[in-house]
Image (cartoon, grey):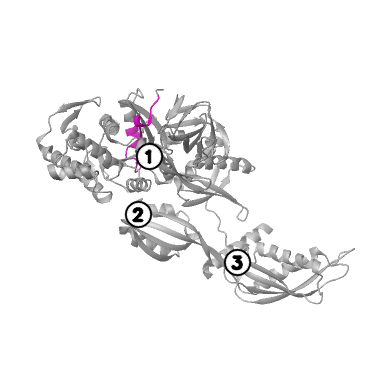
Amino acid sequence: MKEYLADQIRNIGLVGHGSCGKTSLAESILFSTKAIQRLGKVDDGTTVSDHTEEETRRKISISATLLHAEHKGCKINIIDMPGFADFIGEVVAGLRVVDTALIVVDALSGPESGTEYAFDLAETYRCPAAFVVNKIEKEHVNFEATLAKLHDNISPRCLPVQIPIGEALNFKGFVDILKMKGFEYNADGSTKEVPIPADVSAKANQAREKLTEAAAEADDALLEKFFEAGELSQEELDKGLKAAIAKRVLFPVFITAATSNKGAIPLLDFAVAYFPDPTYIAETNALKDDKVVSIKLGENEPLCVFLFKTVAERHVGELSLFRIYSGHLKSGEEVFNSNKRNTEKVAQMFSLNGKERTDMPVVHAGDLGAFVKLKDARTGYTLCSRNSGIIIPPIEFPVSTIEFAAQTATKGEEDKLGAGLTALSHEDPTFHYEISPELHQTILHGQGELHLDVICKKLKANYGIEVELTQPKIAFRETITRKGEKAYRYKKQSGGRGQFGDVSIKIEPLPRGGGFEFVDAITGGVIPAKFIPSVEKGVIEAMDRGVISGNKVVDVRVTLFFGSYHTVDSSDMAFKIAGSIAFKEGAVECNPILLEPIYDLEIVVPDSHTGDVMGDMSSRRGKILGMEPAGKYQRVKAQAPLSELFKYATSLRSMTGGRGRHTQKFGHYDPVPREITDKIVAEYEKQRTEEKH
């Protein structure tokens, strides 16, 4: 493959709401540039981007897919990213390494929750953005109405560089606002120049004026010239547009009909001319010896490579997708893994089009590509020259919003399940799992039900493990609410040496979060010192088993203040049993109660849905702690019991039209209401009875 330097590269990320046409647009770009010979369709499962079994079956994008095309002497790297919120980690990773976010909008639906979230993420990364109004040829489409929604919901700086000729089913072509020329599409997707129709001429002139103003505002000298002369030369306009896009003071808007292969080439023409190349960022921050340093980005600087995604598909092998920020790299060279402090040998490098690979003997600064399986590298790692040792800050992936318990369909596959889940968590950092010894369950954490369902399908396809997802158990706690004392004598004689242990203990509650205290208050040697640790062990074992529901007892102080022993029959085991039974019987008399985990929530929702969200939170026994503005949204802070939050992410998305999102983390334990406690205790007693029989 031809080598490209940074100024010949455009790194573009396709993002937007689900089903807006991102993958179809990517397909149209590849076909129009002759990177592929046949225009695939999502519904047929024949697109280059959606190439995995799950993607073709579901007809949606699940993973960020790296693509490339060549146009007018430039290499166009494209990352086609999923639109469903369950796969937001793919978008976070992709936007981290591209230079322009190309946000696709369904012309009929207008900007949706995924549109807004993609734009917000681009803002977080300070990534220049542009918009593509796709499906412009569909019935009932009104471009001006869609543009107005972009102004209202996204930014008034969304300015069209193309406006349609013909509307909806009568769509024929577009007016190029920069050239002030009309173009109509031929059947094969090519264009022919036509006069600008009279009915759009005024709109085109108005759009041209707004673009010129935006371009002038990006440069003080241009702004002064614009005020004096009232216009800019084409050269000045080009310069201003480039600066305005790079500085995020202008978000150009394009129109396409991707499934009909209309719009890809004009879009690429603009991208080559005006989208920022990788050199628009001169330097970035990194870490070296735990100190923040500034590194220059360029071809002649020390090597710096960032791994933004790991791909591990069956029959493909493990690939590490990368962006090279500075320097250049040849196949066969050794690089330094800054995170692991060891060396990696780069055997081969590829430019990808979905699952198709093209060898890249040399990769230059600014380019994207893929390494074949590296020895010890993970998503977010930095590879560099040995003497530099720098680390690019890792990607901050969103925390999980939903959890399920996973049970293998076949017993004895627990080790195999663990290996599969570990591999999948390396591939997808927004997924993680834990094996809970307390709950005796494997808990999967992810971004939504669809996300975890896809994880399970990958487990079966790649590792031959079938799992069932169920609601996780809740780690309740027990405690006491009043003081008490209990004496217990354990005495057993069955021939030979007997067993004897006699203890008297005081049990009292501690403040919430106080844990456990054991106090040795024995005087006069009534219990030998060597047996006292055994009493404590017995108490701890009883606490671990619980006294009313089988859940661990917390926040108590146990004081051993009296007892007796037998010089022959007393033993560690006897005093351990005596301590255990004394605590269990004594705690029952101290008004034991059940505690439940309470989680702290931060919920971000549109103004129009705050009432619904707050009402729903109250129905979940939640407490609203406060609310504060967050741009066009409200940030609601609340607390709610974990037992009421199962599938909350799904409910929140449904309640808010996909615009609500939340984070949750453990806060503290609170008493369970009496009626719920009674149900849990009754269920526990029923289970114990069944186990005995």
**Above-or-below relation of 479 to 450:** below
Question: Could you tell me which quadrant the C terminus lies in?
Answer: bottom right
Q: Position of residue 224 (x, y in %)?
A: 18, 45
**Which mark lies nearer to you, 2 or 1?**
1
Residue at 57%, 69% (x, y): give it: 512
- Residue 308's label in the rendered image is none
Among the two numbered marks 2 and 1 on one chain, the one whose residue lies closer to the N terminus:
1
Residue sitting at 21 percent across and 47 percent down?
A: 148
* Depth check, front residue: 409 or 275: 275
> Pointer 3: what residue?
478
Q: Determine which residue is flagged by label 1.
A: 282
Query: Which residue is more in the foreground, 382 or 141?
Result: 382
When asked about the image quadrant of residue 634, the answer is: bottom left
Q: Residue 455, position in %: x, y?
A: 50, 42
Q: Which label belongs to residue 656?
A: 2
Amino acid at pointer 2? Thr
For the residue marked with disc 1, what is the amino acid?
Ala
Coordinates of residue 610 in the picture (x, y in percent): 34, 60
Residue with the most extreme left position: 198
Residue 362 location, x and y as percent? Answer: 45, 26
For marks 2 and 1, give the CA distance.
41 Å
Asked whether residue 422 is in view, the answer is yes
Which segment did they paint magenta?
Answer: 3-26
